[in-house]
Amino acid sequence: MIETAAWADYQARVDSLRSALVNLPRGAPIRLHKSRHTSNLFRPRDAAHTALAADGFAGVLAVDPERRTADVLGMTTYEELLETTLQYRLAPLVVPQLKTITLGGAVTGLGIESASFRNGCPHESVLEMDILTADGEVVTARPDNEHRDLFFGFTNSYGTLGYALRLRIELEPVASYVQLRHLRFDSVDACAAAIAEICATRVYDGESVDFVDGTWFNPTECYLTIGSYADAAPRVSDYTRQEIYYRSIQERSEDWLTTHDYFWRWDTDWFWCSRAFGAQNPHIRRLWPRRWRRSDVYWKLIALERRYGVKRRLDRRAGKPESEEVIQDIEVPVTRLAEFVEFLDRQTGIQPVWFCPLQQRDPEVAWPLYRLDPATLYVNVGFWSTAPLPPGEREGFHNRAIEEKVSELGGRKSLYSTAFYPEPEFWASYGGDTYRLLKKTYDPDDRLLDLYAKTVRRR
């Protein structure tokens, strides 16, 4: 239960934000301003200045350990959220793998992690939301009230239907440690078969399975990592120092992490992307402060490169071909995983890539802007790199080919990064009819961008 003082403070922040929105000049673009870096979007967008400061909407209002729920402000990062809930030996049902992803961002976008084969995505454990709409109203959306259509349509709307100010979410109990077992496979087909079996039974080698994800290194080497909660551990690894987590997958068949470190195992080296900055070089790593080995620091380095293009100019002088950023997460049915990975390797040559199985938690629910077949086990494939462009080709060559292949295989693509869909195809894939009705209801004056303009036109 939220304490009276905390609730009063929250309401004061809501009133202030509503007033700022209402007082914006008519036609002025509406976009939240964040003084701290919490964005994990990888698509460029036009700059827009706004008086809507969102930093006041970070923090945990309350944790109810008996009901296993938490009331959380929308701009709260999962790092902040987990720090609070672990004090009660509880955690969100799905904890996205990067510390600065916000709860509101994961719900209005899409969050996936190694518990997603049993718990789905973060939006599936939301019980209610306070949403600021474009006209300055704040509505509480629940699955059983007059705003239920907004509740179910909010996922994958990326702030184009409003902003989540407060969310009540479910929590689940955790143990002190996570035991990891890294299973090697010589083909994606064999790995996919193991994913299907383990996710169906939720058991491996006689023990219950709490987490499943995988790493594909090359066509003859991929691993499935099975995680199980444990109350004790014979030893504990620490991948925030010299050792690198993803390399340990190839070197160890068994490992243990504290539960805290398990949730952030990928953040220290941004999966494997820190190698682009030299952070995996042992000599540089010793000099790189541990507090700067985290995803948001690497993200800032990426932003600097995008702004000044130093590496691009050096590559051009060295005679290297033009390249395209290929930073995507897609989902395909587990039965089509091998086909997609073979295509991706042939198309881009990107190695390694991440696997994460996903299945909708409640088969009776429909999330219209990001529909998945509730009866199907999907595998998220994450790949974050660049690929050389053939002579005469330009940006979109690789990414558009990926979009077409994903559609062919009955999959879906997350919209946090660049997208190149033609508009009719986009709306057919992302709930156009439902979206237009929600837009007309909650943003009739089109003060917010629509989903296509924001994610494809990158405005």
Image (cartoon, rainbow, N blue to C red):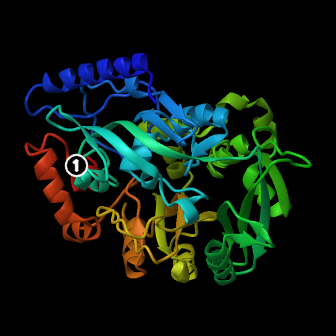
In-front residue for pair 195/329: 195
Residue 317 is situated, as x and y percent measured from the top left of the image, at 53, 49
Residue farthest to the right?
234
Q: Is residue 202 left or right of residue 345?
A: right
Note whether 242 is above or below 420 in the view shown: above
Mark 1 residue crowding within 10 angstroms, few (<14) / some (14–19) / many (20+)? some
The residue sitting at 63% across, 37% down in the picture is: 294
Q: Quadrant of the C terminus?
A: top left
Res. 279 in view: no
Q: Secondary structure at mark 1?
A: loop
In terms of image quadrants, where is residue 155?
bottom left
The residue sitting at 41% across, 43% down in the picture is: 105
In terms of image quadrants, where is residue 337?
bottom right
The residue sitting at 69% across, 82% down in the picture is: 190
Residue 82 is situated, as x and y percent measured from the top left of the image, at 59, 37
Note whether 162 is above or below 178 in the view shown: above
The residue sitting at 47% across, 27% down in the picture is: 59
In terms of image quadrants, where is residue 81?
top right
Residue 178 is situated, as x and y percent measured from the top left of the image, at 76, 51
What's the amino acid at mark 1?
A: His
> Where is mark 1, residue-wise?
147
In-front residue for pair 3/453: 3
Question: Total label count?
Answer: 1
Note whether 42 is above or below 208 in the view shown: above
Residue 73 is situated, as x and y percent measured from the top left of the image, at 41, 32
In-front residue for pair 201/317: 201
Res. 60 in view: yes
